[in-house]
Amino acid sequence: MRHHIYHILKAWYPQRDAGQWLLATIISTRGSAYRKAGAMMLFSDAGAQFGVVSGGCLESDLFHHARKCWMTNTSRTVTYDMQEEGDVAWQLGIGCGGEVTLLLQPVSEQNGYLHLPQILDGLDNNQTVSVCHRVDNAHAQIHLGEPPEPTGWFSHSVSPPNTLFIAGGGVDAVPVARIADTLGWQVAVNDERARYARSKDFPAACQCLEYPVAALKEQVAYQQAQAIVVMHHQVELDARFLASVAAYPPPYLKYLCLLGPVHRTERVLAQAGIAADTFPVPLQSPAGFNIGGDLPESIALSMLSQAHAALYDKPYAQSSYDWQCASA
């Protein structure tokens, strides 16, 4: 089970009328906590559970509180203090040492499913959704947009899953797609060559495309890409693709890498007729963090670790082509 709210809602929606459901949302934390404010999960009276708000240590106790919410059809807040010896969290032996407060809200057709289907629609359309939870009374209520009043609401933003575009569908692209899929990212792999990017080799949720490079700029999967990994292992294809990225960069692009050593990158850029500083983000080559290992799975982990850092605004450019050229 992937734990991004998009995947949680996707799994819940077909079952929304099967029994009673409850939405648990972390509305505040203090000190160490496994998840932060805004994390959400859904669970039902039949035992179904989508998402997590802890490492698995709080969910069983939350179910007891959920029963009270279902019985009274009201919301409630629950606080777990991992520093207080008398608190249930201490008795459970969690040991994080922080404090977590959750809002529990019944979800039903009568309360419009708390606008969860509308949130899912927004995420499906690659939109960030502003969500406000009513916290100052027992009536379960969620508002989309800015809070209706200045107090009594917990507000946070829900963003679509990260998006990865893999240019090149060879055998070593498969672990890249699989790891990214496990992370809950939206993955597309494109290769215009026959017998590449075959859907049977990739995760079911992965889009497998076979567009020529010239047509990619019009494709939604390319336009929405936040991270791009170039791995055709063919100089001409890599060159044409990078030239297209330079001319038509995706508007949300935050990470771009090219497999291969620096001397190969120089050859690819020369054939493309572009400079390394042409791109809107630094071209990472060699691709990925230096974590050791030479198997496709290790290389995939290395690249996706670096891409993950870039997408979450952490330092990542330890191997950018610009940096290496400047240091030579």
Image: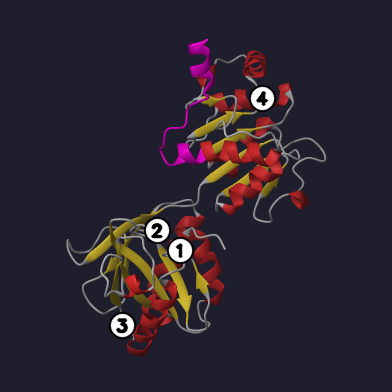
| Mark 2 residue type | Tyr
Instruction: Pick the residue in front: 34 or 91.
Output: 91
| Mark 4 residue type | Gly
Disc 2 to disc 3, how far (Cα)? 27 Å
Mark 2 — residue? 34
Label 4 vs label 1, nearer the camera: 1
Q: Residue furthest right?
A: 195
Q: Decide which of tag 2 and tag 3 comes sooner along the chain.
A: 2
Residue neighbourhood size for the residue with mark 3, other residues' Cα within 10 Å, grouped as few (<14), some (14–19), many (≥20): some
Q: Decide which of tag 1 and tag 2 comes sooner along the chain.
A: 2
Q: Is residue 187 on the magenta stretch? A: no
Disc 3 to disc 1, how far (Cα)? 26 Å
What range is drawn magenta here? 307-328
- Left/right placement of residue 141 relative to residue 293 reads left
Disc 4 to disc 2, how far (Cα)? 37 Å
Mark 4 — residue? 260
Disc 3 to disc 4, how far (Cα)? 58 Å
The total number of labels drawn is 4
Mark 1 — residue? 55
- Residue 46 in the image: state x and y as whole percent: 52, 83
| Mark 3 residue type | Thr
Q: Which residue is drawn at 31% across and 73% down?
A: 141
Q: Residue at x 40, y 71 (%)?
A: 58
Do the residues bearing badges 4 and 2 touch, measured as CB atoms within 8 Å? no
Q: Decide which of tag 3 and tag 4 comes sooner along the chain.
A: 3
Label 3 vs label 4, nearer the camera: 4
Label 3 vs label 1, nearer the camera: 1
Disc 4 to disc 1, how far (Cα)? 38 Å
Mark 3 — residue? 74
Instruction: Pick the residue in front: 310 or 234.
Output: 310
- Image quarter of residue 105: bottom left
